[in-house]
Image: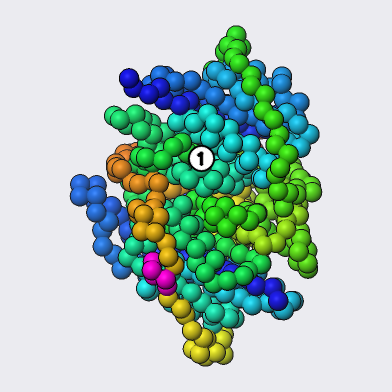
Amino acid sequence: MLKIVVCVKAVPDPKEAHKIKIDPATKILTRSDVPFVLNLVDKNAMEAALQLKEQLDAHITILSMGPPPADNIVKECLALGADQGFLLSDRAFGGADAYATAYTLAKGIEKIGPYDVVLCGMASSDGSTEWVGPEMATFLKIPVVTRVNEIVEYDGEWWKVKAGLENGYRLVRVKLPAVFTVTRDLNTPRSLTFSGIIKARKKEITQWGIDELAVPEESAGQKGSPTIISNLATIDSKRTVEIITGTREEKAEQLVQKLADTGLI
Amino acid sequence: MKKQPGSVWVIAEQIDCRILDVSLQLIAHARKLAIELETSVEAVLLGDKMNEQTRQLFAAGADRVYLGNAPDLAHYQPEIYTEIIVKLAKERQPEIVLIGSTSMGRELAPLVAARLGTGLTAHCIDLVLDENKILESIIPAYGGLLSIICPEKRPQMATIAAGVFPKPEMDENRTGEIIALEVPDDIPRRIQTLEIIREKPQGVSFESAPIVVAGGAGAGDLEGWRKIADLAETLNAALGATRPAVDEGWAELETMVGQSGKIVSPELYIGVGLSGELQHMVGIVGAKVMVAINNDAKSPVFEQVDYGVVDDCREFVPVLINKIKEYQEKLVTC
Ligand SMILES: Cc1cc2nc3c(=O)[nH]c(=O)nc-3n(C[C@H](O)[C@H](O)[C@H](O)COP(=O)(O)OP(=O)(O)OC[C@H]3O[C@@H](n4cnc5c(N)ncnc54)[C@H](O)[C@@H]3O)c2cc1C
């Protein structure tokens, strides 16, 4: 059986994330009740797992690190068709950078047991680093392919995938177990179904903290993060705007005139 | 006595034996950091038959080039590249390692950083030294600019996109030392690149385009997006996208402009149906004239441009295209 782990992240809803601001004076994040949602491209990782399960004898485990409310997104993945879910949640995991996150997730994967494939989204909408997949693979001592946009061959121990490159792609052969980070181009994620939601009610989410994972405190969360935020500055990108008014036709005409005046069109 | 700081490294990148511009831009910036740190600039270059190209690295500001020349290194191979760089870094202990935010860099940088047990900052828009000579990586977040540091672990690592730092002045008379690297023979070969396909990019390229039209979530749907694409075509402009437009599948990831995408320096920028979030706006450097089209008069984008039109872009853009065409025809007949 192909054992698949899908790593997912709860992120502030990108549609409202701009409401989270830092007060430049106090350097404190302005409190806002932006809801957590499943990171968009993680849905493509999830969809890839589901499609593999339709083709092969496979078992899907969901793994997430985050605060307790993140169990909602694990539930969502269970409702989509995953078999079991794990949430790594502990105060001590808070403030983790990509390195500490990857380390903790790798420890979680090792504790879950044998696996063949680890799938994650290419990046999270709130961090956008693309580091977690490759760093996790490093801690697991297995290969990684990032930005996968097509799984070409998936039977046997060696897989063939296409991964995005500037203006093209690379065709890569990779030996399992391996980590794949996927892009939005890989597939079209399916939607939740009512029967899926009902079935998921019976599926359990296991929550592990720092003790269960046996991660030393100095390797987790902020303490385990090599990077820290040292400063916040405001920037002044302001220009004085001239708002062009009138009917639609007039506005278009005036704008063309302004552009023509610059000599750029 | 104070310990001599390690060098500032740039992991240079070549595609088909051509050194990428971003590598030269980073070397020139590394030079500035190295002067402040009183240390040297070293580049690592992996490829096949790359001796000649090292001259460009010296001309841009490198003092020393670690050169791996082997058929096996001709193109990026994650396991071998990582192994060589990690081994060398452990030996030479650089203070700072900079890598371009290219598709290679985005994968190689975290592989190297995790192996070295050190921190890595993503897609920075500036790199400076603080009063303790610690590297500050600047990234936009939460409506401001964050400085991220890696206070204890070494090297301090960062990725930076092409165009963040200017084109370097090349000093063809500069030379330096070349140190040949061995390709280790005990490398696991669990990933094999079978083929690299590069297609000719579609549309106008960002690098050369004097005009960039960027579209955002306000396009509404693919039909709305096509109108923005038509505007770009009419102006012979490069077409950029915000992240939501990429997420919706209207635009390719490669066309995303901003902190985690492309950095562009057009003379004229026209942002259509986008809100002017910092992570997007930092992707536009030094534009002479900036225009925004947005249906919300209170949108923050209007504080960052020279000309604004408050209107529904789906209605306005086709009208604008017609007016531009009329103007263009007049030019031809004059
Ligand atoms: C770490 C990190 C990195 C990021 N990197 C990038 C990056 O590299 N590039 C990037 O673009 N984003 C990036 N983002 C996302 C960024 O923060 C914003 O979410 C994004 O730029 C917003 O895109 P938008 O303006 O298209 O969408 P929105 O913010 O949703 O704005 C849509 C705008 O369209 C207007 N509108 C709606 N309908 C219409 C209409 N019919 N006609 C005219 N106007 C209309 C609205 O008034 C609104 O102003 C990053 C975020 C994070 C956290």
Our reading of the magenta stretch's main secondary structure is helix
Q: From the viewer's perspective, is A197 left or right of A159?
A: left
The magenta-colored residue range is A208-212
- Can you tell which quarter of the image residue A185 is in? bottom right
Query: Residue A225: percent from the left, percent from the top?
Result: 39, 51
Residue shown at 62% from the left, 59% from the top: A179
Query: Residue A29: percent from the left, percent from the top?
Result: 27, 56
Quarter of the rendered image showing ligand 1: bottom left
In the picture shown, does residue A182 fall above or below B59? below
Q: From the viewer's perspective, is A212 left or right of B46?
A: left
Q: Disc 1 marks which amino acid? A: Thr
In the picture shown, does residue B101 fall above or below B314? above
Kindly tell me whether residue A134 is visible in this rendering.
Answer: no
Which chain letter goes with mark 1? B
- Can you tell which quarter of the image residue B318 is in? bottom right
Query: Residue A58: percent from the left, percent from the top?
Result: 68, 77
Q: From the viewer's perspective, is B98 left or right of A210?
A: right
- Residue A103 on the magenta segment: no
Question: How packed is label 1: few (under 14 Cα within 10 Å), some, or many (20 or more)?
Answer: many
Kindly tell me whether residue B64 is visible in this rendering.
Answer: yes
Q: In which quarter of the image is the C terminus of chain A?
A: top right
In the picture shown, does residue B126 fall above or below A13? above
**What residue occupies the far top of the structure in this picture?**
B173
